[in-house]
Image: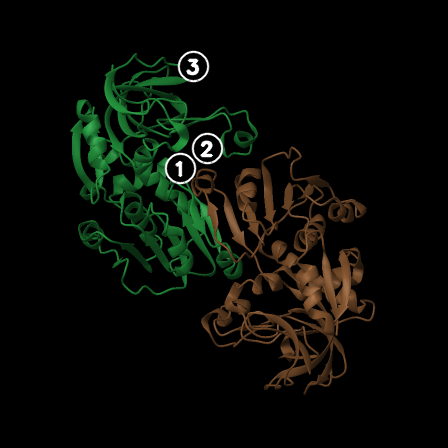
Chain colours: A green, B brown
Amino acid sequence: MRAVVFDGEVRVAEVPMPVVGPGEALIRVLTAGICATDLELMKGYMDFKGIPGHEFVGVVKQSSNPHLQDKRVVGEINCVCHRCQYCQLEMPHHCMARTVLGIQNRNGAFAEYITLPEENLYLVPNSIRDDVAAFTEPVAAAFRIPERLHITQDDRIIVLGDGKLGQLCAQVLWLHSKRLVCVGKYPQKLALLKDLHINIAYKDDPIERGADIVVEATASPDGLKRALELVRPEGTVVLKTTLAAPTPMDLSEPVVNEVRIIGSRCGPFRPALEALAMGNVEVRPMISEAYELSDGVRALQRAAEKGVMKVLLHV
Amino acid sequence: MRAVVFDGEVRVAEVPMPVVGPGEALIRVLTAGICATDLELMKGYMDFKGIPGHEFVGVVKQSSNPHLQDKRVVGEINCVCHRCQYCQLEMPHHCMARTVLGIQNRNGAFAEYITLPEENLYLVPNSIRDDVAAFTEPVAAAFRIPERLHITQDDRIIVLGDGKLGQLCAQVLWLHSKRLVCVGKYPQKLALLKDLHINIAYKDDPIERGADIVVEATASPDGLKRALELVRPEGTVVLKTTLAAPTPMDLSEPVVNEVRIIGSRCGPFRPALEALAMGNVEVRPMISEAYELSDGVRALQRAAEKGVMKVLLHV
């Protein structure tokens, strides 16, 4: 089969078909999305080698479960052991033996075929078209925030970052509180949120401090510093950025202000699919471009350029 | 009156008596304790100028409240406005207009006399002698941890740091869970905890990862990194160290492990006094030396030396 392969350099190559393990399904990928994490992997994050890609929609081609066969699916990316202490403690996505689709010891979705455990798969309703379904994983990541934090309509929320993840976080948190502003720097990106009637600001605008919750999704080393300036004492900073480089941090600030900093990663697929089906989260305007899999290298280069939002691969 | 004064350099000097404001009491300091924060102030932390010192026990010499007059007291160090948004939200120690005894816009306790709002004062029972009562403020800071975190006897806790604050945190958290180990590097310091039958380890010992709670009290720039290695996914790191210097931090680690990092500062005086009165927290062995106020400069130098625990000033 054809796939995008990374081994220090990126190229499109013919590779062997994946081997279907016990409890796994073979999936023909239809559409895959390029994520900032993919671009970090190409810079050395996680020491990843193999086929990247963890945002996808596909069709099940081989499965022992008749309810899945030939169905359109999306899939949770953490493949877990069910035996280690974290699986036992019902924190499966922290499984110590996990593989992660296109991120850790498991080939990903920038390929014609992938395998995933059947338990990871969710049927995609017909009302959600491929280009939208490919966003399920990042939308789920945004839904992780209200899963970990109790958010009320009175909470004042600042989302830092107008990129893909920042916008999805802003849209999801907007469902919880209208006292929200998304802070960015690209007029054409912020315009997408404005079209959804979500409050926006430019990073150099004066922004009222003392927010209850600040979401750091800038993918910039300065983001945490800015978040700590804007959050109120005993407030919460949610870290969404995964950066390959260490960030200098003034630790006395969170200590004196008794701030809570919460890391947040993968999230629940069900509310993400529901929001996409209901149109409560609008992702189509975020699609900048789509490429064929054979143009995967160019697609990754394009996704890394400033001002570009989601780049899709049609497989 | 005589006081230790810092204006870029430390010296003992004759200074004017403090002016007693409305609602305030005048207190004759009996004993004051030197804290790591005092040593950080001398390095430029908080841009402090004036009389340092925020750990004290004293006698009320002038007060409109007859229940306080001539009584032995300790005092909360944050002096607040009762009007700003954080006071209204019942977070007075984050008051935006606050002064902080010996730390921020208020002269401190390395002096013959101080003033504090009467509402800040707590009577000290006769059973607690001066040298012990002077520890109330740092013991209260340790009690801030169970005030912010729900801790059960099943929680596995690692306290990093065998200094004064680390030891007090270990003693206080030991009251909540015996699945605790305090990690340090000074045999003579760790011996104090061993005498209290609290589990100890040396920093180069193999330490089981996956703790539910890690308290960072090393006062070292490496402390947070180590804490993030030792805490379990979705576990909690409590930051106790206030350092003048920024710390490099790999942000991807707390994001992937979804760790919660909580800053923690001043704490409740009542449980601290109760623990000292009941002997549930044992501070006397932590006293390395005591100096007269006139030897304040030497006392501060001594407190900064490696291996030294609490240095007291007898005023």
Give the quarter of the figure containing the N terminus of chain B: bottom right
Amino acid of disc 3 = Pro
Rendering coords of residue A281 (x, y %)? 27, 45
Crowding at dot 1, Cα within 10 Å, few <14 / some 14-19 / many 20+, comes out as many
Q: Chain of mark 1?
A: A
Q: CA distance from mark 1 to mark 2?
A: 8 Å
Q: Chain of mark 3?
A: A
Rendering coords of residue A152 (x, y %)? 41, 56
Q: Is residue A75 above or below residue A170?
A: above
Residue B9: image quadrant is bottom right
Helix, strand or loop under label 3: loop
Rendering coords of residue B15 (x, y %)? 64, 83
Task: Choose between A238 and B154: the one closer to the eye.
Answer: A238
Q: Which residue sits furthest right?
A: B127
Q: Is residue A147 above or below residue A230?
A: above
Amino acid of disc 2 = His
Q: CA distance from mark 3 to mark 2?
A: 19 Å
Question: For the point 67% across and 64% down, which residue is it?
Answer: B300
Q: Same subunit under labels 1 and 3?
A: yes
Q: Nearer the viewer, mark 1 or mark 3?
A: 1
Q: Which mark is residue A266?
A: 1
Question: For the point 58% across and 49% down, which residue is it?
Answer: B220
Question: For the point 63% across and 34% down, which residue is it?
Answer: B208
Q: Which mark is residue A93?
A: 2
Determine contact: label 3, label 2, CB under 8 Å. no
Q: Is residue A127 visible from the viewing direction of this image?
A: no
Identify residue for label 3: A22
Pointer 1 or 3: first along the chain: 3
Determine contact: label 1, label 2, CB under 8 Å. yes
Q: Chain of mark 2?
A: A
